[in-house]
């Protein structure tokens, strides 16, 4: 095992050699350097154990405490003491205010645009009815548009975009059918207008939506936030993927779920995002309380249920026979109840449990992100057509 002093000396010597004598490193020494890096990834040379931060009078004392402290309970106290709310920076709170204003403006503009478009169509329909010489009621021939004038003809054709068809064959267009369709459109538009006017987004709803958007932006950044931890089965590096709603981790060994839970608690307590972590114990307690309430409610709603059960055993010749039957079957009934309860708990854990995804070995982990040069410098993504446009603009300005 390498000591911390040896590691520091090796790192400093490497940096010094690369900077001041880059030709010093041969292929052999570079290979050794890579092996050294691989050793760091696959082992725990720095002994990053949670007990290493404590002072012990002897190694025996340290080993005794290790036996007492379970890794599964690590960070549990800190996790329980942490508030189950997101913590925001001043910059994030300022972004939330801006997000609220944006949502408010978008809501008002969207609602105005919807109502404006409906009103515009209703205005056109009303004009056709008023100026098109169309009767409000059917005449003796059962028609609205028997005496329709040229204004009504032109506007109906334009409204339904039938100019080409009418130009080729005027008899092709049935104005009575068009007008009946127009009336149905008017009824639909009036319904949509009523629905649009009922759409109201309160200030509280806008604030809630802006808070959710800021939380999502905050959690999206978790892809670049990591925690390193030493477990009894090796090192692990963990981050949170908000798109997948899953904790992703790198490790060289198979890590059991109970250890991943401890590392997950470390993550949420480090970056103050406790709400993304599902506390299974609390979820099970809630489910048990809910089942208890449902049973009590069922007893109140069905007070004659016991009588119905007793009635089903009246076929037995005596009360003793019923008691014997009851004793024989009580154990199997209890077993079935226990099995049903266990199934419910397993389903609950499966649905609400934290998700962990293995992303590869530690040697595959790279915290450094590749720079998108096209974003950094838009000139790199410039096409030849864009270049010609800039040239033409320059020529116009110079002339």
Image: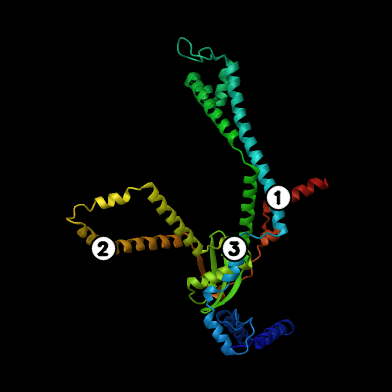
> What residue is pinned by disc 2?
327
Disc 2 from disc 3: Cα separation: 49 Å
Question: What residue is shown at x 72% (from left), y 57% (from top)?
Answer: 91
Q: Which mark is residue 274?
A: 3
Check residue 98 in the rendering and tell me which mark sits there, or answer none: 1
Taking the image as shown, residue 377 lies to the left or right of residue 141, namely right
Q: Nearer the viewer, mark 2 or mark 3?
A: 2
Instruction: Give x and y (percent) for residue 141.
Output: 45, 11
In whole angstroms, how far apart are the C-alphas of marks 1 and 2? 69 Å
Asked which secondary structure carries label 1, the reply is: helix
Dividing the picture into quarters, in which one does residue 277 lie? bottom right
Single out the residue that lies furthest toward the top: 140
The quadrant of the rendering that contains the C terminus is top right
Residue 165 place in picture, x, y as percent: 51, 25
Q: Residues within 10 Å of mark 2 (few under 14, many from 20)?
A: few
Q: CA distance from mark 1 to mark 3?
A: 25 Å
Left or right of residue 342: residue 359: right
Q: Residues within 10 Å of mark 1 (few under 14, many from 20)?
A: few
Q: Does the rendering let one see residue 45?
A: yes
Q: Residue furthest front?
A: 319
Q: Position of residue 353 (x, y in %)?
A: 49, 63
- Residue 218 against residue 36 in the figure, above or below: above
Circles 1 and 2, Cβ within 8 Å, touching? The answer is: no
Is 187 or 24 nearer to us in this picture?
Answer: 187
């Amino acid at each position: 095992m390498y000591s911390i002093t040896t590691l520091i000396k090796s790192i400093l010597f490497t940096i010094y050699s690369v900077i001041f004598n880059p030709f010093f490193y041969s292929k052999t020494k570079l290979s050794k350097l890579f092996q050294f890096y691989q050793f760091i990834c696959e082992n725990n040379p720095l002994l990053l154990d949670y007990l290493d931060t404590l002072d012990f009078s002897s190694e025996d004392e340290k080993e005794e405490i290790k036996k007492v402290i379970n890794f599964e309970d690590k960070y549990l106290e800190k996790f329980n003491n942490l508030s189950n709310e997101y913590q925001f920076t001043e910059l994030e709170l300022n972004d939330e205010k801006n997000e609220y204003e944006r949502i408010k403006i978008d809501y008002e503009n969207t609602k105005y645009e919807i109502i404006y478009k409906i009103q515009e169509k209703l205005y056109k329909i009303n004009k056709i009815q008023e100026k098109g010489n169309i009767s409000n009621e059917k005449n003796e021939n059962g028609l609205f548009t028997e005496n329709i004038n040229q204004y009504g003809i032109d506007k109906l054709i334009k409204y339904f975009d039938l100019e080409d068809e009418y130009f080729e064959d005027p008899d092709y267009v049935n104005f009575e059918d068009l007008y009946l369709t127009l009336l149905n459109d008017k009824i639909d538009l009036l319904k949509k207008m009523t629905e649009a006017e009922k759409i109201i987004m309160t200030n509280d709803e806008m604030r809630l939506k802006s808070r959710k958007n800021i939380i999502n932006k905050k959690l999206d950044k978790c892809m670049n936030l990591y925690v390193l931890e030493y477990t009894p089965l090796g090192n692990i590096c963990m981050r949170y993927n908000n798109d997948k709603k899953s904790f992703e981790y790198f490790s060289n060994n198979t890590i059991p779920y109970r250890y991943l839970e401890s590392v997950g608690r470390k993550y949420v307590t480090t970056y103050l995002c406790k709400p993304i972590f599902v506390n299974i114990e609390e979820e099970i307690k809630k489910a048990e309380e809910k089942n208890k309430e449902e049973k009590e409610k069922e007893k109140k709603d069905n007070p004659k249920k016991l009588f119905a059960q007793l009635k089903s055993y009246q076929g037995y010749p005596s009360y003793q026979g019923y008691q014997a039957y009851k004793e024989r079957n009580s154990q199997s009934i209890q077993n079935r109840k226990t099995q049903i309860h266990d199934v419910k708990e397993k389903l609950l854990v499966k649905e609400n449990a934290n998700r962990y995804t293995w992303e590869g070995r530690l040697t595959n982990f790279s915290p450094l992100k590749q720079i998108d040069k096209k974003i950094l410098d838009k000139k790199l993504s410039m096409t030849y057509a864009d270049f010609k446009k800039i040239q033409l603009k320059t020529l116009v300005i110079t002339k």
